Amino acid sequence: MRSRALTLLVLGALAGCSAAAAGGADPAQPQVADSSAASAVQPAADRQILHALNRLTYGARPGDFERVRAIGLSAWIARQLRPRTIDDSATERALAELTTLRMPIAELLREFPRPDPKMREKIARGEMTRQEMQERYPMEKRPFRITAELQAAKIIRAVTSERQLEEVMVDFWFNHFNVFAGKGDVRWYVSAYEREAIRPHALGTFPDLVRATARHPAMLFYLDNWLSARPDFIVPAGPNRGRKAGLNENYARELMELHTLGVDGGYTQRDVTEVARAFTGWTIDRPQINGRFVFRPLMHDGGEKVVVGHRIPAGGGQGDGERVIEILTRHPSTARFVATKLVRRFVSDTPPPALIARVAATYTGTGGDIPAMLRVIFESREFSGEDAYRAKIKKPFEFVASAVRALGGSTDAEGGSALARASAEIGEPLYLAQPPTGYADRADVWVNAGALLARMNFALALASGRYPHVTVELPALVAGTDPRSPAAVLDHLLATIVANQAGPETRAVLAAQLTDPQVTRLSTDDRGPANTDVAKLAALVIGSPEFQRR
Amino acid sequence: MPTRRTFLKAGGCALVAYTAAPRFLLRTARAAEANGKVLVAVFQRGAVDGLSMVMPHGEAGYAGGRPSIGLQPPKRGEADRAIDLDGFFALHPTLAPLVPLWENRALAVIHACGSPDTTRSHFDAQDYMETGTPGVKSTPDGWLARAVKTRPANQTPFRAVAMGPVLPRTLQGDVGAISMQSIERFDVRAGSDGSARQGFESLYEQGVRDLLHGTGRETFEAVKMLRSANASRIPPANGADYPRGQLGEALRQIAQLIKASVGLEVAFADMQGWDTHVGQGAERGQLALRFREFGGALAAFAQDLGSKMADVVVITMSEFGRTVAENGNRGTDHGHATAMLVLGGGVRGGRVYGRWPGLARHQLFEGRDLAVTTDFRTLFTEVATRHLGAPAAPLFPGFRATQPSLGLFA
């Protein structure tokens, strides 16, 4: 093992050598090692493209920057805002083998039956062997497959889809209207939830999202509204026949706190109860057979309601809930709350109030048109300002997807599952956020020692090809560089993976790595560059502080 | 149990591996010498039903509202019944592993404890309990982090540790708290070749002092220390048997950190699954299963640490309690006050603390919930000042105690 003193000794020399290799600065001044392209000499327009790629996609793939520059940044953004105009047939083909993605809920319930509790008892009593159970209840018929396929699909889409902004927004809105795939019947509903309630409206209007999620069985089940009934309702049939049901406030509270008004949006416990009354009867038709929305007038509380100052007259039936959604989505608190979350996602963990106000005004002016709000953000000086540049820390899922993309990688379904597990190890198990807040979009939640180690370990495993079914094209990535010049390889990696946004310290440290006999060694295969352990260098770049930012 | 000598010996080995690291070895030795107090906080996420955890069987208003989820009162000689504590309160039957601790006066209960804030939102209430500032959401740091900050400097990266994938709000703040999913996996896993570890370490050592770099530096200090202390290899002692599950795993590893003397002062563990809106169950069922794991894990922890528990206090907390009456789905909805447990060294256990507000309708908060008679900050202040020796002032900004201290500590 080398001593640190030695590292420091060779560091200066190599940094100079790297600079010289890049054909730039005076080797006598090793600190200016990043002469090849650094931010200082990068035209503002190019920086804008890099910034947009960082924020509107799951990270740039090799060649993305050139493609965006060719069609022009604003034309590219305009296209991303209209995903239907972008051909994405390659992604569709990659998803074809994941059959559960397209199945209606009733079919999923039929094809992936819940385990028979009697079978477990029989095994416990020794009346049945595990093997017999495997045969009677094979793995491919078990309900966990639904979530597993959805997780793999999310990874595949983030890595390969051309409709990147749509994927970013699907993730954003899913977290906003979170459901937890581990809660009861939600497992059978969650694919349909993303497909029917979230995706079609991800770049549509906000009120449509609220309407679609409010009546979806996944949400009805997750926040218990399917059980909520007028106080004197007696269950007429089924296993709970004759029992008194009752009001359940869970959905009503989260609808206001997390979906629309925000916690300081000006509602009271009284409003929570009134909203809960309005949504009584919004339930699920035979949850384990049909799993479809149904309004049951018998469960509904027909009386008058008053919601944040608006009177809803008695006798409105199913319309009560719809009226509540109308009231809430037109409320100025909702405009502000949605604007704040969007600005936090796309600009900064501390969203600038002036931009929030403009986006909120756009919400109010357009009836919650999502592309209109995004346009205001993307065209704002706050978005392109120095404060916002690389100011966001990637969530674990964003980090995993962006790493595969940066290495020019691709994955099939099996690889997608492995990458989903990686996201879980770094702290973000997909579709498995238990609280209705979904996953947070702030650095302080994700940056901690354990997660940082997990990121580094993921970088090492990915770059060295230890994820079967995930292909990373390292040789292609450094093709055209002089394989005998480690410094040239490093320059190329930094240019491709972090678009030369590495600080001089990072560049110097990586240059020092090149002197490590473990890193610079004779390669035995003829595909890669001759004498540089590209995988380790790439892993270090992906695990570097710079790559954690977007 | 590792002594200073074993640390110096381990240090000798590590010296070969990390030429540039002697300062951390000094830290290890100092931390081991300090032999300080440890506070372990367990958060029952989702709002535990305190009335099932510590049942007020002497309370006339208990059974009426809970036809299907109410516990049967304790009855001597009958198993599966709630376990009487003092003639008025009883432990849930699945918490039986805690009974020896109660009898040894190492376990205390604080009932009708909670927040003065009336929110019934999990997220707000957890936020308030973790920051220690009910009603104020903008508090930047957590109260446990502030408690650590008040203590004399201790040069170890393991002053504050949370078991889990993310750092909880209560340990956020400028104290370098660490979160980890497991001790074993807390390292750069690059096979036999250490160059990747060293590469990453150098990358985070350089550069500006921001959240990312600061965290990176702390990470590598911590990795080295754990390796030299060999913490993940320390087996449970005294026949302690941790139940499977999130809390058992967390407490088992917190015990390892304590026994490895890495300088731990505050540890945090989460347990999920308390939000029993539907099908809560009574002596058996959903909630009973959670209590079984909860009680088993706490008891195993105390057993594992043995005489070391003299320096350790465990406190359990939950964001609020649940409705006194069951709802239409044989569950309970979000309520107000709940019960909290304190166990360990110096605790005057074997007693239920706090004024009991009663369950008659007029005694309930907003006509439906157990009223709060002990502000959680009164309890937390007492534990932090008496056990950790922290000064009270900075822990809970804006808090003025309106009740005398509970007298939890001798």
Image (spheres, coloured by chain):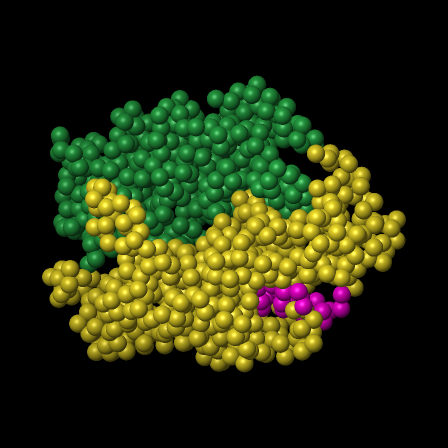
Q: Position of residue B67 (x, y in %)?
A: 14, 50
Q: Specify whether B238 is left or right of B1.
A: left
Q: Quadrant of the C terminus of chain B?
A: top left
Q: Is residue A236 visible?
A: yes
Q: Give the magenta range.
A: A42-63
Q: Residue at x 19, y 74 (%)?
A: A297
Instruction: Note whether A341 is above or below B114 in the view shown.
Output: below
Identify the colour of chain A in the image. Answer: yellow
Check residue B321 for magenta coloring.
no
Viewer-side residue, B133 vs A334: A334
How many marks on residues? 0
Q: Specify whether A356 is left or right of A132.
A: right
Rendered image quadrant of residue B289: top left
Rendered image quadrant of residue A19: bottom right
The chain that appears green in the image is B
Q: Residue at x 65, y 43 (%)?
A: B196
Q: Specify whether B114 is left or right of A533.
A: left
Instruction: Note whether A270 is above or below A131 in the view shown.
Output: below
Q: Residue at x 41, y 58 (%)?
A: A148
Q: Position of residue B156 (x, y in %)?
A: 58, 33
Check residue A48 for magenta coloring.
yes
